[in-house]
Image (spheres, rainbow, N blue to C red):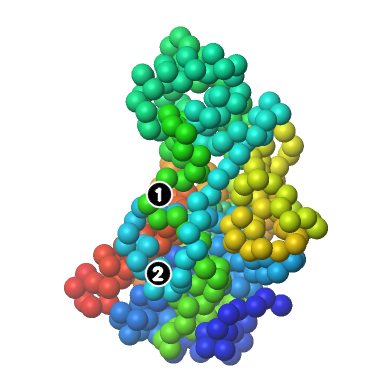
């Protein structure tokens, strides 16, 4: 049984049994960031009745968290760390949660040592003899400037000693991790993917450098319960949008866009994951929130949740992530795969979606087929509301 804080006041039901669709002006498929934020905006700013359905048994989409062993708050769909530079997103979400400041740190298991990821000047020092590390550090600073972040694919375009260093970092940190994670080489993906984890010409060992880095003080599910708690919003979990009878309401669809159109232009590729959660009777199992294993094991990384939540407990809970190919109906489509070829495959779906505008809108990680972080999903929902939904409802679209 899943626990929802504020459940008494959140209008939540399981299954579509007693839903009366005529009561609702809008139906939103998906109770993740995209769907929940849009529901809240439409309910509170336009005073319209919204039904949010999710085929999972809970709200919060991939950000769903719940109490696991030892009372530790765990993320069912893998570790979710909130970070953003978008003050607007930060302000919006702060109306629904207090925050616990948290800066995520990641170590990579490389050549038998644990070194900071993103690879930085301390990683260099840990993996190279002292004199070589000092001369490479000087060369990096001279070439790029202290404090800069350099995408690995760009660094590999350099020559001489820098090229040799870039090839080393590429081989030890990026190549096998990317093959495991995506079943592709780094250069086959959109360059923005490897640029997410740059080489740092500094000793900054924080995984993110965003201006806002915090976790919702009592978790994501509690925050979502507050976002969705509005007299104009009704939420039905365990309810697939496709099971609803013919609908007169406007629709926002945040599920997979290819699935909505019955895979008419072919299935879009996604990457999936299997999670292995386990508890240990020790206070702390690893020195930081996440340890990456680029070159060993079938899993990519292990995350220990208590670093994220700040809970003090005698035991601990960890999760290993095993990337898998996605098989529709068998596992979850977690990551759209950002390659130029997939952008082409997406195009006919975007055209079909545009033809439905005015009745159905698509948004979100799956609805847009875009590799969004949580803050980007939230920003996309706020922008869709302001630029399209609100003008449409007010009649000035
Ligand atoms: C392993 C992993 C780790 C991540 N870590 C981070 C992180 O550290 N920081 C970060 O910022 N972001 C992270 N993300 C990204 C984050 O999960 C997404 O940005 C966010 O979940 C996007 O929200 P969304 O609402 O667009 O999609 P989702 O959260 O996927 O919500 C979509 C919802 O729609 C529902 N749905 C789909 N089809 C239907 C249908 N037909 N009928 C009814 N319901 C339907 C689904 O069940 C789902 O609940 C991570 C993602 C993964 C997979």
Q: In this view, does 295 lie to the left or right of 282?
A: left
Q: Residue 276 carries which label?
A: none
Q: Is residue 388 left or right of residue 223?
A: left
- Whether residue 353 is visible here, answered yes or no, is no
- Residue 190, compared with residue 321, is above or below; it is above
- Whether residue 120 is visible here, answered yes or no, is yes
Say which residue appears at 34% left-offset and 25% top-offset: 145
Closer-to-camera residue (72/190)? 72
Query: Residue beneath label 2, please?
Result: 94
Say which residue appears at 71% left-offset and 29% top-offset: 112
- Image quadrant in which you'd find residue 248: bottom left
Q: Which of marks 1 and 2 is nearer the N terminus?
A: 2
Closer-to-camera residue (202/374)? 202
Report how far apart the C-alphas of labels 1 and 2 lie in the structure.
Answer: 16 Å
Which secondary structure, mark 1? loop
- Residue 170, compared with residue 46, is above or below; it is above
Closer-to-camera residue (361/10)? 10
Say which residue appears at 62% left-offset and 82% top-offset: 14
Image location of residue 157, percent across then percent down: 42, 18
Image location of residue 272, percent across then percent down: 63, 50
Q: Residue 210 carries which label?
A: 1
Q: Quadrant of the N terminus?
A: bottom right
Closer-to-camera residue (183/231)? 231
**Any atom of ligand 1 within 8 Å of the CB at mark 1?**
no
- Residue 40, compared with residue 337, is above or below; it is below
Neighbor class of circle 1 (other Cα within 10 Å; few <14, some 14-19, many 20+) is: few
> Which residue sits furthest left?
396
- Image quadrant in which you'd find residue 141: top left
**Any atom of ligand 1 within 8 Å of the CB at mark 2?**
no
Which secondary structure, mark 2? helix
Image location of residue 62, percent across then percent down: 57, 61
């Amino acid at each position: 049984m899943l626990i929802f804080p504020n459940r008494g006041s959140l209008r939540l039901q399981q299954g579509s049994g007693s839903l009366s669709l005529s009561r609702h002006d809008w139906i939103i498929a998906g109770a993740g960031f995209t769907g929940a934020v849009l529901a809240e905006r439409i309910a509170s700013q336009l005073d319209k009745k919204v039904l949010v359905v999710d085929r999972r048994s809970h709200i919060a989409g991939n950000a769903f968290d719940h109490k696991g062993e030892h009372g530790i708050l765990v993320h069912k769909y893998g570790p979710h760390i909130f970070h953003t530079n978008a003050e607007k997103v930060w302000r919006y979400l702060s109306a629904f949660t207090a925050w616990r400041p948290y800066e995520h740190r990641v170590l990579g298991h490389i050549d038998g040592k644990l070194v900071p990821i993103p690879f930085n000047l301390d990683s260099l020092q840990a993996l190279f003899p002292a004199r070589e590390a000092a001369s490479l550090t000087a060369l990096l600073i001279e070439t790029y400037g202290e404090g800069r972040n350099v995408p690995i694919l760009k660094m590999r375009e350099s020559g001489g000693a820098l090229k040799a260093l870039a090839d080393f970092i590429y081989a030890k940190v990026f190549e096998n991790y990317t093959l495991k994670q995506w079943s592709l080489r780094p250069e086959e993906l959109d360059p923005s993917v490897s640029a997410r984890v740059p080489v740092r010409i500094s000793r900054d060992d924080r995984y993110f450098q965003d201006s806002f880095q915090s976790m919702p003080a009592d978790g994501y599910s509690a925050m979502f319960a507050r976002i969705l708690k509005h007299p104009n919003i009704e939420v039905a979990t365990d309810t697939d949008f496709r099971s609803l009878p013919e609908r007169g309401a406007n629709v926002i669809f945040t599920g997979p866009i290819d699935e909505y159109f019955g895979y008419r232009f072919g299935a879009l590729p996604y990457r999936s994951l299997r999670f292995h959660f386990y508890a240990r009777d020790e206070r702390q199992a690893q020195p930081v929130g996440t340890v990456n294993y680029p070159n060993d094991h079938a899993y990519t990384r292990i995350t220990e949740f208590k670093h994220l939540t700040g809970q003090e407990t005698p035991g601990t809970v960890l999760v290993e992530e095993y990337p898998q190919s996605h098989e529709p109906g068998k596992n979850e489509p977690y990551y759209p795969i950002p390659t130029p070829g997939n952008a082409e495959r997406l195009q006919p779906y975007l055209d079909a979606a545009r033809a439905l505008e005015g009745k159905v809108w698509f948004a979100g990680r799956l609805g847009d087929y875009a590799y969004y972080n949580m803050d980007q999903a939230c920003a996309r929902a706020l922008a869709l509301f302001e630029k399209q939904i609100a003008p449409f409802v007010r009649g000035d679209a």
